[in-house]
Amino acid sequence: MAKDFWIGEVHQGKYDDQEIELKGWVHRTRGSNKIWFIVLRDSTGLIQCVIKKSVVGDESFDLIKGALIESSIILKGTIKSTEREHGYELQVTNAKVIGPVNPDNPFPITESAMLEAEGGESEFLLDNRHLYLRTSRMTNMLKVRSTIFGAIHSYFRNQDFIEYQAPNFVAGAVEGGSTLFEVPYFGKKAYLTQSWQLYAEAAMPALERLYTIAPSFRAEKSRTRRHLTEFWHAEMEIAWASNDEVMKYGEGVVRTAASKLLEERESELNELGRDLSLVERYADNPYPRMRYDEAVEILQSKNVEIEWGQDLDYSKEKILTADFDLPHFLTHYPRIAKPFYHRPDPSDQKYVLCHDLLAPEGYGEIIGGGERTWSEEEILERIDEEGTPREPYEFYIDTRRYGGVPHGGFGLGVDRICAWLAGADHIRETIPFPRDSRRVTP
Ligand code: ATP
Ligand code: MG
């Protein structure tokens, strides 16, 4: 039952005048009692197929004519180049319906339903997400996503990083208690992990350069354009590295993802309506750096209400990045704005040695990272000043008791970088089955 021929290959001109067999799904149909046109879809593209009653016979003709949109079919025939829309067509000699669609229950994702939904965010389309995945918009997005995952893996592996896995059930918070998902755990409480970081730091003295791409879970109560409750998190940790050095990797991985997209996904990005010159700019140029204090001044000059010491939330990042032409690193946040594992700046203890990478066009934060607190003394001081209980972090503190070294790392939101590079309005568009505070189905 293997599949030997792909529509994408037909359009590359591989099968001119040859007899081949195409397997796929009915995308569109039209015709008469004598001739029937099916636009066939497979994972690589669309092709028009012409079925004549005089060629395939009455019985086959009636059966294939009854194949509704999204029926799976097999068509055998000859490939001819045409002047028409798709460049090539299949002149069918033999047609078979494999998985029919019941006329009482036709495929619900119609063009009018899509138009009403303006890009796939209606409740109706979210309820039918399992079927919506087959639309060209979602297929293009999933291919873009796959290229980005591949780019991240190859970027780190090419530099001898080791892929390392951390547990998903954990006892402590990384990003603060308010977004912790609690799960019953045999009479005790456990949480779903918010980040791989603390467990990666434990392996830092073993592997020195490590990375992962894994899901992280955060109970984000408010629904925004850039938060999911389950998202894909690319994280790295590196020994003997300063905040500056860690930023180089962040810039490197993001630029690699942008240039891989240009190499592999030009047509998908075009179909998604993305301006490719922007993606090129993000691939080709170094990313400027700015201190937190400067960002606060810019915001204040735009009459945004912000006090020194506050973290920047989405509403503020959106305003700040609206006129950026490139991603910018924001560094040196106030110590009081960041969790205990961020290392205070030895030259001015009011700040920590950290960075967020903010994407332009109003997208905002895609990376959060920095140097880690690495001496036992400093980490205890930071935990206590934050009022965090020591107990769940005993293992983490313990790693500092045996040969602590300077190190750092970052977390990159993979769904966020997909949304930004593909130009999606909403993070939900980038993931097959989005999870947020209102939805865990389908
Ligand atoms: P935000 O302020 O936007 O909530 P954060 O500061 O909580 O982000 P970090 O803890 O630094 O984020 O996480 C590292 C990266 O993971 C972020 O830069 C972002 O790209 C991604 N990320 C964080 N939370 C989410 C989420 N709920 N959904 C999707 N991606 C997320
Ligand atoms: Mg957050």
Image (tube, rainbow, N blue to C red):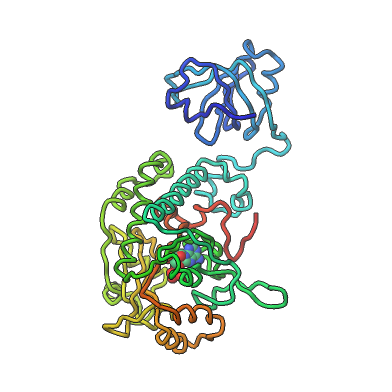
Please tell me how many numbered marks the rendered image carries.
0
> Can residue 307 be seen at all in this image of the molecule?
no
- In the rendered view, does 190 fall on the left or right side of 6? right
Up the image or down, 364 lies above or below 51; here it is below
Q: What's the residue at 42%, 27% (across, down)? A: 12
Up the image or down, 388 lies above or below 326; here it is below
Is the C terminus in the top left, top right, bottom left or bottom right quadrant? bottom right
Q: Where residue 154 sits in the image (x, y, percent)?
A: 41, 51
Q: Where residue 288 sits in the image (x, y, percent)?
A: 26, 63
Q: Where residue 401 sits in the image (x, y, percent)?
A: 45, 82
- In the rendered view, does 298 fall on the left or right side of 341? left
> Can residue 53 be seen at all in this image of the molecule?
yes
Up the image or down, 148 lies above or below 250; here it is above
- In the rendered view, does 96 fall on the left or right side of 323? right
Q: Where residue 218 sits in the image (x, y, percent)?
A: 54, 69
Up the image or down, 24 lies above or below 360; here it is above
Is the N terminus in the top left, top right, bottom left or bottom right quadrant? top right
| Along the viewing direction, whichever of 116 and 380 lies nearer the viewer | 380
Q: What's the residue at 50%, 18% (across, down)? A: 79
| Along the viewing direction, whichever of 415 and 426 lies nearer the viewer | 415
Q: What's the residue at 67%, 23% (across, down)? A: 96
Of all residues, the one furthest to the top in this rendering is: 54
Q: What's the residue at 41%, 87% (across, down)? A: 377
